[in-house]
Image (spheres, rainbow, N blue to C red):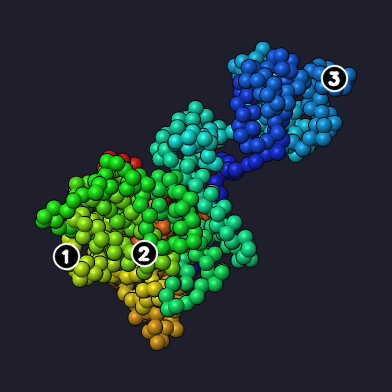
Amino acid sequence: MAPTIYSAPRGGASLMLSFRPKTVLIVGSSTVAAARAFAALESDAEVVVISKGGIDDACEELQYRARQGQIALLDLSTLPRSSNSKSAEDSDAEALDAYITTAGLRVSLLCVTDTVHGADSTFRRSKESAQKMHAFCRARNIPANFTDVPELCDYTFASTHRFTEADSGEPTPLQVAVTTNGQGCRLAGRIRRELVGSLPKDVGGAVKKMGTLRGMAKAADAHDDAEQELDEESIVATPNRPVPQRNGGRVETEADIVRRRMKWIAQVSEYWPIDRLAHMTDEDMSKLLNDGRGTIPCPSHDFDNKDSHHVLQLTPPSTPRKGRILLVGSGPGHPSLLTVATQTALTKHADLVLSDKLVPAAVLALIPKHVDVRIARKFPGNAEGAQTEMMEAAVEAANRGLTVVRLKQGDPTVYGRAGEEVLYFRERGFEPFVIPGVSSALAGPTMFNIPVTQRGVAESFIVCTGVGRQGKEVKLPGYERGRTLLILMGVARLPQVLKALTDVENTTGKSRDGPAYPPHLPIAVIERASMPDQRSICSTLSDISTALESAGDQRPPGMIVIGWSVLALWEKGDVTVLDAETGMDDEERIRRWLGGNSWRIREGLESVWAEF
């Protein structure tokens, strides 16, 4: 095999940072300077504005902020400078240097705004003067920005938006920034507006609530040394990696509790709808950290809604209405991939929706507001308990005469535990009605033009899980050249899966039932299929772990596709894998497919999906 080739860097981008400067020095006093000063103040920086004429010639906003004591506003003309200078403008850099030294300032950033074209000021700095200031900044290692002089800029300003709480209007920690790297500043503003407009109005409040939740977790764990080693940020790339199960009377250690708590926080961030996060109460957060079991009603569909018939004290009629339970598949995630039957169940028949955590917010948003929606808390270590609680909740509601929709991702019978629920409900007097859904096992590969079967490549496929009941390992099928292997719920256990597939020493047949898989075999890790941020990482069995690491954080839910079908439809295609007469060996196929690289990453939803 060819040596691993990592992605080649392509210049022209910017290093995007979330920066908290200590002192920001601004030269100029126009409205541009005022905008820069306000942004710096919001980052809690000390702001010093220096301009020709000082406060008397400054714009109204800067005058106001100076009088309020928010900024220091100095007259550049009065700063000491050498008498040998040809002009005051030529010696401005010298004056700034002397001022910074005398005042003992440690300037984080310098922003020169009086170079702007069309500035609302009678003075505009020459390019020669700006170049002298740039040289002075370089000598002092101060990053500088010169408005409308891009060749002198060490950094640029992105088009930013800071989110506020929907109810109170108070600012939140959430900000978004868009940059075109100088290729279209006006367009950057438009893109920012459209991004902001596409996000839920409660997204800033959700971030603020998560900050509170993380603070509670750390405060609760301050006594434990393990907390110093475990944090949400350290596990966010693999939020589905298992933790010890709560069973067999096992007593959890303090480290187990901390690990579980941080896992829950990461998964809440990943799976819960934004409005659910934004409306968490202190009681909800305490329960999440200290209990971690059961379900909590979604606030946008709460029992406190006076328009909901759930809050009414109804007198049972002489012949109570018989409740019913519908087991419904929501498809892979995109709302347009719901079946008509599923959409009808959610929008016309449901009184209560009990949803798995993987069902995306875009699907839940279709449910009428008067319908109560509850999200399963199937976090690592609590899957069995949460499953039981959801089934109990369904029976309790059906006994009250309600129509319960048990909403599952994909198809409910494909690793959706529909069989267990059918038997459970039947034993308690309810024969559930199962509505099929588009299986993620088939839809996921299709979203990236990977066929699970293809003449000349794959004559069959097999679907299996990457983890057994209560986290136990499963036996995977052996290699067959003409078969595609689909593994659900296996991305978090990729190293174990790869070892089971490729281990030639599997003499006991414990981890694999059949021949080992060749290390050059194509594999695709598909994440969040059919969602706007969907991603596929294609490589070989030998390189996929490195490829996955290079891609950054994981995007659950994910699945694994293994076999020659992964490359069958790439560009010109290759449908001669099963043809022994082609004269092409497998390593040559791989080189043609990957173009000499070790992996390929594709992400995002094709724009045509906006039509559906």
Q: How far is disc 2 from disc 1 in space, using C-alphas?
A: 22 Å
Circle 2 is placed at which residue position?
A: 386
Is residue 215 among the parts visible in the rendering? yes
Is label 1 in a helix, a strand or a loop?
Answer: loop
* Kind of residue sitting beneath label 2: Ala
Circle 3 is placed at which residue position?
A: 85
Residue 338 image position (x, y, % from top left): 24, 51
Q: How far is disc 3 from disc 1 in space, using C-alphas?
A: 93 Å
Which residue corresponds to the image point at 75% horizontal and 34% vertical from the top-left?
137
| 2 or 1: tag closer to the N-terminus | 2
Which residue corresponds to the image point at 35% horizontal and 55% vertical from the top-left?
375
Is label 2 in a helix, a strand or a loop?
Answer: helix
In the picture, measured across the screen, residue 426 lies left or right of residue 59, that is: left
Q: Give residue 431's mark.
A: 1
* Kind of residue sitting beneath label 3: Ser
Q: Residues within 10 Å of mark 3 (few under 14, many from 20)?
A: few
* Kind of residue sitting beneath label 1: Glu
| 3 or 1: tag closer to the N-terminus | 3
In the picture, measured across the screen, residue 449 lies left or right of residue 90, that is: left
Is label 3 in a helix, a strand or a loop?
Answer: loop
Q: Give residue 163's mark.
A: none
Residue 537 image position (x, y, % from top left): 43, 58
